Image (tube, helix red, strand yellow):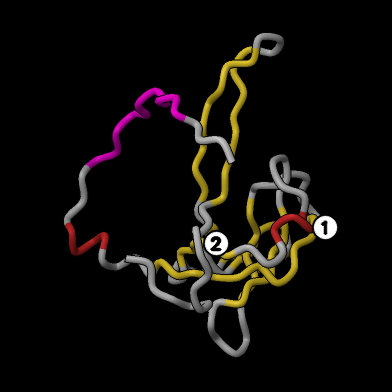
């Protein structure tokens, strides 16, 4: 796989936070077990994750424009595990899959956004802590 060595323009900085606030985030590894288009939203996928718990979890992710559901199955992703669950267009989302967002220049249409889900370079147990 070729590396992208371009440097993205610096996004507008967010305010600094105390280290203790960062430590409140529970970042975990989860394995995608199933993914399908969200039944009530054009831009979302409904993703079933093995997060190391017996019941697993469901996350609604705004990545439909960049990923086919079947290409996510088996991938290990990084999630925010302690985000409050919320209902998104009738489906419960129990966390967030982390992704990088990149603006690229396209000659024909101008700028275009690319979204890349954060994955691991080798497998670890589902539920492993990311620190």
**Residue 122 x, y percent position in the rendering:** 50, 64
| Residue assigned mark 2 | 77
Q: How many marks?
A: 2
Which is more N-terminal, label 1 or label 2?
Answer: 1
Q: Is residue 22 left or right of residue 43?
A: left
Magenta residues span 5-15
- Viewer-nearest of discs 2 and 1: 2
Q: Nearer the viewer, residue 6 or 22?
A: 6
Which residue is drawn at the image coordinates 26% and 60% (left, top)?
A: 22
Mark 2 → mark 1, Cα distance in angstroms: 23 Å
Circle 2 packing at 10 Å, graded few (<14), some (14-19), many (20+), is many
Q: Quick check: is 106 in the magenta stretch?
A: no
**Residue 41 x, y percent position in the rendering:** 76, 50
Question: In this rendering, is residue 111 above or below 23?
Answer: above
| Residue assigned mark 1 | 39
**Residue 4 x, y percent position in the rendering:** 50, 31
Q: Is residue 65 visible in this depiction of the protein?
A: yes
Image quarter in which the N terminus is found? top right
- Element marked by disc 2: strand
Q: Quick check: is 7 in the magenta stretch?
A: yes
């Amino acid at each position: 796989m070729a590396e992208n060595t371009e440097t993205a323009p610096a996004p507008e900085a967010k305010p600094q936070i105390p280290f203790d606030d960062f430590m409140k985030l529970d970042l975990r590894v989860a394995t995608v077990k199933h993914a399908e288009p969200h039944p009530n939203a054009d831009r979302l996928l409904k993703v079933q994750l093995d997060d190391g718990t017996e019941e697993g979890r469901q996350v609604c992710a705004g990545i439909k424009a960049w990923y086919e559901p079947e290409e996510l199955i088996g991938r290990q992703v990084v999630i925010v595990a302690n985000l409050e669950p919320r209902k998104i267009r009738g489906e419960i989302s129990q966390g967030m899959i982390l992704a990088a967002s990149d603006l690229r220049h396209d000659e024909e249409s101008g700028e275009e956004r690319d979204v890349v889900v954060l994955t691991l370079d080798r497998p670890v147990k589902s539920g492993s802590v990311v620190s």
